Amino acid sequence: MRGIATKISGVAPLFLLFIAGAVSAFEDIEKLRIWPLPAEVSHGGRRMYLSEDFKLVTEGSKYEDPSGILKEGFDRMLAVVRLSHVVSGHRNSSSSGGSALLEGLHVIISSSTDELEYGADESYKLVVPSREKPYAQLEAKSVYGALHGLQTFSQLCHFNMKKKVIEILMTPWNITDQPRFSYRGLLIDTSRHYLPLPVMKNVIDSMTYTKLNVLHWHIVDTQSFPLEIPSYPKLWNGAYSPTQRYTFEDAAEIVNYAGRRGIHVLAEIDVPGHALSWGKGYPSLWPSKNCQEPLDVSSDFTFKVIDGILSDFSKIFKFKFIHLGGDEVNTTCWSTTPRISKWLKKHRKTEAEAYEYFVLRAQKIASSHGYEIINWEETFNNFGNKLNPKTVVHNWLGTGVVGRVTAAGLRCIMSNQDKWYLDHIDTPWQMFYANEPFEMIKDEKRQSLVLGGEVCMWGEHIDASDIQQTIWPRAAAAAERLWTPYTKLAENPDKVTTRLANFRCLLNERGVAAAPLVGGGRVAPFEPGSCLAQ
Amino acid sequence: MALNPPLLHTLLILLSLSTTITSSLPSQSLQDSPPYLWPLPAKFSSGDETLSVDPSLSLTVAGNGGGSPIVRAAFDRYMGMIFKHAYNRASSLLTRIRFLSMVEYDITSLKIIVHSDSEELQLGVDESYTLMVSKNNELSIVGAATIEANTVYGALRGLETFSQLCAFDYLTKSVQIYKAPWFIQDKPRFQYRGLLIDTSRHFLPVDVIKQIIESMSFAKLNVLHWHIVDEQSFPFETPTYPNLWKGAYSRWERYTVEDASEIVRFAKMRGINVMAELDVPGHAESWGTGYPDLWPSPSCREPLDVTKNFTFDVISGILADMRKIFPFEFFHLGGDEVNTDCWKNTTHVKEWLQGRNFTSKDAYKYFVLRSQQIAISKNWTPVNWEETFSSFGKDLDPRTVVQNWLVSDICQKAVAKGFRCIFSNQGYWYLDHLDVPWDQVYNTEPLNGIHDPSQQKLVIGGEVCMWERMWSTREAVSKGNITLTALPRLHYFRCLLNNRGVPAAPVDNWYARRPPSGPGSCYAQ
């Protein structure tokens, strides 16, 4: 507590740094208030003001913005920039602006499509002039790269308390940026607690501020089944109540909302282990009334339901991946239920083999609907050589599996629970920051099999009341690990404290309930004090 | 006086419940249950019909005030809340059936009648309304809901109640009103229903304050008590004394004059008054960061220097600036927890005391009374914390409103002397006291021990986290076992807040602002 407080209490020390000039390159980066840090940044020492009618211009762009993704992104950017204070000072081309006036942003996008494609180019180049040129320039391959550029631009903008206008300090800026990993995820869990739509949308909006790009939606689990499945309309009888549900249209709306912000939605059904709630609507999915998990492996109906769900999913979840879970399968119910134990004997399968059979059959169904499959790591640990070779293994138990998965030639996503589980509230942000996906892997070919990582917000103790302060700011620490080039990352996380504290305050200004840095997750501020010092 | 800042989630928690409630609560049978309205209206009757509400519900207005932009903006806000589920009209079963049979929705328009065209928002403004929801009949071809109110602010309360009657039905994928026809006649029990926020101990960004104001309107609270400044920081721009906000935590943690005006405007659109507070002379150390002369000495900084005219010039300057921003008739001058040691220990203050033959308590009184006259000269009614009343009640300006916090019977004593009083007993209505269960908050009664009706009238209300008691009639809230009459409605209201994006915490946690104890339904936690 005290250590940080003295480092950044008040503003004076920051200003002294600006004036001093003779600071090392690393400290120079740290005084930039940008999170996550871009790949390449250079800046000057002048100041520009944003015109009160700051415009978007797109001359020379190949992208025609058919559904308004860019225009909306631009309007959102201006709205958050203007959210923290009333802009009442006058700055426009006819009056007081002069040569320090920035009249707009010129966006040039070279690809005409607005399809959100996984692994597509997310890079952008942002130039903010210092004088004489009235437009900042943002170049990107795709509109989604441009959205990232808009986020960075929004972080360069500050409110000037004296002139009461928006300004950009330290111009000219030259920023060239692209993500280190193509998969930068956040898991939310709507089975342990229902999350209302406005809450999910808030989470999605806050993800864009740190350039995360995959919302992993763990929709269903043992406790509740909140989503409408048109092919099997009784499944959502497993919801907590008639009102704690998502219609099919709600889910499509979430995908659409996320997609327009450059975020993929990865849907998950966690089979066969975490699926008790399925049987509320269709009890024959349970081995028996008093032994309700895992799903009945012996019945074709089980796989028909999975097929129905995935067929419905394929209409709304357009991400190339689907998550089939496969973790923590306790198969006791299979051998203690006479009907199933008979089936096991008939097919000469052990419980473990039945588990493998279930996972592989579910994989085939998912493939038939055009999906590539992600499974939790137990599937790899138990029968890795049988998995569909395009399977992406999702780590959670420990760190070693990333090495083994890539050695086996499979792709991998890292979410080791000791560092990247947000529900572990005593894990401080420094550990989130320091968790390095390539720690165990030096071989470049194997490194290329690590798609990225994901922080997991499991929902046992998370509902609408506390989700945002449990996610933030720790998820932001991981987001920089996943976005920023390795060479730019701090070896000692404490070096980035000031910049992250600033970003936490920025989240607060934008109405996101990010918790203080000091302590673990979801802490209340310890005592009165500045946001920047807590 | 709050010792800790009430954070957004704390405000909305209705604290814990010591009795254990097991899982399956109402959920299955919304139609058969008591009306899930919070706070409970003064009078209502309902029926047994279910009506569907048109997602393109239209607004028609009448009366002198019907055309007010406040009504239109509120209607648009509530449309967003009522129809928040993605609407695919083609796939809605009900729509298809209705389309085939050419039948329309039951409720296709909302009529709002406002009699007065005055948009002035003050204490005691008429907030009453009647709300009728019924199917079309011989008298009207179009099915409609009607809100009738004397003022736009009554209409806002009626809209809130209307929105709570509307529930999304997952089978028909349409918004329905159960138990129609409804006839509701409602008005608040107390004219002052407040919530205090503290922007000195921690800066609260403008957007966060707006979220709080918005959520206050859901519970029909009507006064945001803005404790702007305290000893820790001075985040507010004061054009007359521009160095004052040097006392902010940082140059980013500040409110401009325009920010404050925007907050007042935003609150007014929701029928909420903003009462500003300067807590003098005790809680004001941060003033001296910009003007060190306000401190008794650099080493003894609180309370404000009572000897200097400059001190009162600054107070007058701040109040003149604030008068342009805050139109509410009350201004809070604090006056609590004044430790006068610095006056006794600082040579020039000590000499001044001796010269006037003042004890330090006399000086405290002198300070408060002089500040009161400054506020009154700016056409403000002063509000002061209860210490001023308990120390020199008979000298207070008779217009003073006494705000209770320490002693439970202070309002009793204040109204007996003819003062108006606001109830905020710290034992029950301090949100930063996280260990007060919701039922104690609910059961706390501002009129306890006050029997004379003319004295009861002087208790103008209460402040902090007291949703329902401030609005509903005493009879209605105290009837029967509150675990049956109030708790299910409170669960429902908490989930409604969540559904509107407000991070209201579980109702039945033993300790407030704690995460849910385990997986489960919102309605059961």
Image: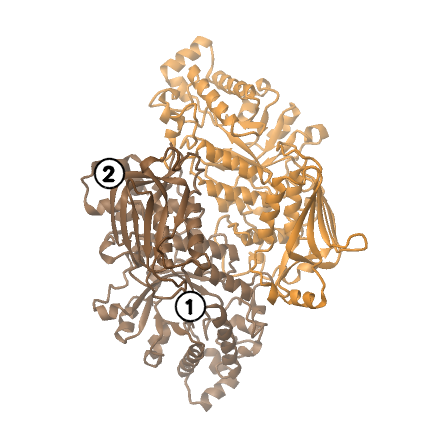
Colour in which chain B is drawn: orange
Furthest residue in direction bottom, as rendered: A346
Spot occupied by residue A117 in the image (x, y as percentages of width and height) = 38, 66
> Which kind of residue does numbered mark 1 sit on?
Phe
Whole-angstrom CA distance, mark 2 to mark 1, is 45 Å
Who is closer to the viewer here, A259 or A69?
A: A69
The chain assigned the colour brown in the figure is A
Residue at horizontal 47 percent and vertical 82 percent from the top: A335
From the viewer's perspective, is B145 left or right of A300? right
Instruction: Please report, as a chain letter, where disc 1 is located.
Output: A
Looking at the image, can residue B36 be seen?
no
- In this view, the residue farthest toward the top is B355
Q: Looking at the image, is A200 positioned above or below residue B292?
A: below
Q: Amino acid at mark 2?
A: Leu
Residue furthest to the right: B138
> Circle 1 sits on which residue?
A319
Q: Nearer the viewer, residue A181 or B225?
A: A181
Mark nearer the N terminus (2 vs 1): 2
Q: Residue at x 47, y 57 (%)?
A: A461
Say whether residue B246 is left or right of residue B522. Answer: left
Q: Which mark is residue A17?
A: 2
The disc label shown at residue B483, or none: none
Q: Position of residue A3 (x, y in %)?
A: 29, 42
Tell me the residue at 67%/57% (across/down). Answer: B53
Q: Quadrant of the C terminus of chain A?
A: top left
Q: Secondary structure at mark 2?
A: helix
Q: In the image, residue B58 lies at what x, y percent?
A: 66, 51
